[in-house]
Image (cartoon, rainbow, N blue to C red):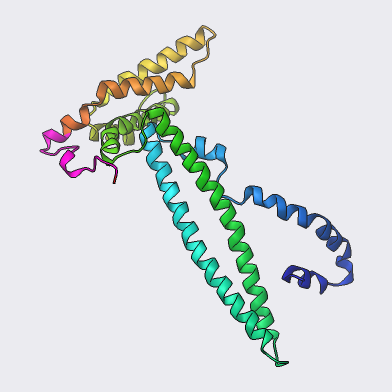
């Protein structure tokens, strides 16, 4: 008998209808819970968690998820083994107790079994999370035509990533502010070496094109926004490097960057 059953058994008679329902449904619910014993669904990972605008930055995000989940699984494995060793020790102690007061030992054993079961259930969810993140990561590598990513790949991607992020945020702010980029994103664009008036012109042109399409009964697409972000990244890709050079800095020193697989 597990701890929940012991607790329920001690309840007053008026709880009988509830206990019958629990007895009927809880085993099924426990099985189905395994389907949701993870932090995020596959859908959420692909659409709401990993939202980076370039494939390489998405891969970097996924690598962080992979590392975090792997470390959690490793630590859980050690914890599980310790609990299993402790459980064996307690069970041997109980067997050799020879009729002495064993209430404390029985409680300790029940508690350890609960801990072990909970660790195992969490581990199953973590395994599914890790497998999904690895699958997503491999999909990106395949699309990029690579079998691994280097630090140099990541560094070279940073200009496009930040330019696209800045313009995406600027566009979102402008939609809510009568077409005007907000102060925070003007600061972001300036730090990337992009003139705020030029950025505003790009955003205004896109909003006007969308409105023209709507006036003609056409629906602007999400894909169109992504294409626009890539176009502005093409136009301004050298701006951060030029602005850094004005301040006697460099955005990338290849000699200090890992280029090969370790």
The residue that appears at 21% across and 31% down in the rendered structure is 240
**Image quarter of the N terminus:** bottom right
Q: Is residue 214 left or right of residue 87?
A: left
Q: Nearer the viewer, residue 159 or 93?
A: 93
In the rendered structure, does residue 144 fall within the stretch colored magenta?
no
In the rendered structure, does residue 260 fall within the stretch colored magenta?
yes
Q: Quadrant of residue 91?
A: bottom right
Q: Nearer the viewer, residue 98 or 189?
A: 98
Q: Is residue 243 left or right of residue 96?
A: left
The residue that appears at 60% across and 60% down in the rendered structure is 120
Residue 225, image x, y percentages: 42, 21
Residue 74 seen by the camera = yes
Residue bounds of the magenta highlight? 244-261
Q: Main secondary structure of the magenta part?
A: loop
Which residue in the rendered view is the most extreme toward the top?
216
Vertical placement of residue 165 versus 197, above or below: below
Q: Quadrant of residue 88?
A: bottom right
Residue 39 seen by the camera = no
Vertical placement of residue 69 versus 190, above or below: below
Q: Is residue 198 left or right of residue 117?
A: left
Residue 233, image x, y percentages: 30, 24
Residue 8, image x, y percentages: 79, 69
The residue that appears at 74% across and 68% down in the rendered structure is 4
Vertical placement of residue 121 versus 247, above or below: below
The residue that appears at 16% across and 35% down in the rendered structure is 244
Residue 117, image x, y percentages: 64, 64
Q: Nearer the viewer, residue 156 or 224?
A: 156
């Amino acid at each position: 008998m597990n701890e929940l059953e012991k607790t329920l058994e001690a309840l007053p008679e008026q709880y009988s209808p509830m206990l019958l329902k629990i007895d009927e449904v809880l085993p099924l619910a426990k099985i189905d819970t395994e389907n949701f014993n993870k932090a995020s669904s596959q859908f959420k990972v692909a659409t709401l968690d990993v939202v980076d605008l370039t494939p390489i930055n998405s891969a970097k995000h996924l690598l962080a998820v992979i590392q975090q989940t792997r470390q959690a699984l490793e630590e859980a494995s050690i914890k599980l083994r310790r609990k299993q060793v402790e459980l064996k020790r307690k069970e041997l102690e109980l067997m050799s107790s020879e009729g002495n007061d064993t209430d404390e030992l029985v409680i300790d054993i029940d508690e350890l079994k609960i801990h072990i079961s909970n660790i195992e259930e969490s581990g199953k969810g973590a395994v599914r999370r890790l497998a999904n993140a690895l699958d997503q990561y491999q999909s990106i590598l395949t699309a990029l035509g690579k079998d691994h990513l280097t630090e140099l790949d990541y560094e070279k991607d940073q200009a496009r990533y930040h330019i696209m992020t800045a313009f995406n945020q600027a566009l979102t702010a402008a939609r809510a502010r009568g077409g005007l980029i907000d102060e925070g994103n003007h600061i972001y664009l300036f730090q990337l070496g992009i003139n705020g008036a030029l950025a505003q012109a790009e955003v205004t042109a896109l909003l006007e094109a969308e409105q023209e399409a709507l006036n003609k009964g056409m629906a602007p697409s999400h894909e169109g926004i992504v294409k626009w972000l890539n176009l502005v990244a093409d136009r301004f890709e050298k701006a951060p490097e030029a602005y850094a050079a004005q301040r006697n800095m460099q955005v990338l020193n290849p000699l200090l960057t890992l280029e090969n697989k370790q």
